[in-house]
Amino acid sequence: MGWDLGAYSRSIAGQSPATVRAYVTDVRGFAQWAERGGVHDASGVERVLLRRYLAYLTTRRYARTSVARKASALRQYFAWQCRRGAIAEDPARRLTAPAGGARLPRVLDRRELAAVLEPGTERREGAEGPVRPRAAALDARDDAVLELLYGSGLRVGELCGLDVGDLDLPGRTVTVLGKGNKERRLPMHDRCRDVLVCWLEEGRPRLVGPDTPARAVFLNSRGRRLGTRDVRRILDRRAPSPTHPHALRHSFATHLLDGGADLRVVQELLGHASLQTTQVYTHVSKERLLSVYGETHPRA
């Protein structure tokens, strides 16, 4: 029978491409490990083998969040095998792994945000004199990417997948396709709209090449659709310290809550299916409140 990973991949095609890749990779990793022990298809897997695999991952010092995700992938995979009648019983039913750590998402402070969002062209002119057209185009793109990530709280994959038709610049909104193919419309602030106009009208035409997707909003230096690694490189150039692009989304949510936004509004803006997922940002805000209290209250 084999593991039939191709059919499994097609069965979860409704999820985001990143999720599909991650789940298939996780199941493939288990399959390769199991085959080294003489188990060559799903019908030969028992619950004890799955428990041994999770223990093996722990000894290999995988993060608890990674082990938990792999356990989730295995539960989904074996439930699918059971539904299609390939196996009689589901060995992964109620399979559990250590819960992810309680580490809070990183939030950029005002100094860090100012450095990240500083207009790139001004920086180049101050340091290098006149800006070449291609360098100015890349600066305009970087400004628009970072303003949109922080200003509207997009996931990096959502930003990279944007098409020109997803932008309503006069109405200051952007429509994104999030996890589970759920569409949501997000507002953007004036500065974000302005840098997008600059990128689309002045910067993007300078990067267009023979392989350029006609509808892609953001392009890399080769004229192709911008990828997640390209975004990471943009932030590496701008941030004063190592910063993951998702930190801009964390900062977006936390700063809204700090400003008095309703938790359910933030949930809708982030595209979270569960309010519990959004609640992590209330803990971040509490940490900041305690920090301010400790630094400013005369009795603290």
Image (cartoon, rainbow, N blue to C red):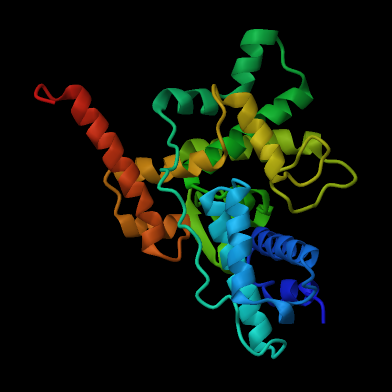
Q: Is residue 247 visible?
A: yes
Task: Depth check: give the residue in front, 72 or 184.
Answer: 72
What count of labels does the image hold?
A: 0
Q: In this view, does 266 lie to the left or right of 287?
A: right
Q: Quadrant of the rendered structure where residue 103 is? A: top left
Q: Where is residue 64 in the image (x, y as percent from the top left)?
A: 52, 51
Q: In which quarter of the image is the C terminus?
A: top left
Q: In this view, does 225 lie to the left or right of 197?
A: right
Q: Position of residue 98 (x, y in %)?
A: 47, 58
Q: In which quarter of the image is the N terminus?
A: bottom right
Q: In this view, does 73 lie above or below 61?
A: below
Q: Is residue 254 left or right of residue 3?
A: left
Taking the view exactly as shown, the residue that stands out farthest to the left is 299
Residue found at x 78% / y 75%? 3
Taking the view exactly as shown, the residue that stands out farthest to the right is 210
Q: In this view, does 184 lie above or below 39?
A: above
Residue found at x 53% / y 27%? 116
Residue found at x 79% / y 52%? 214
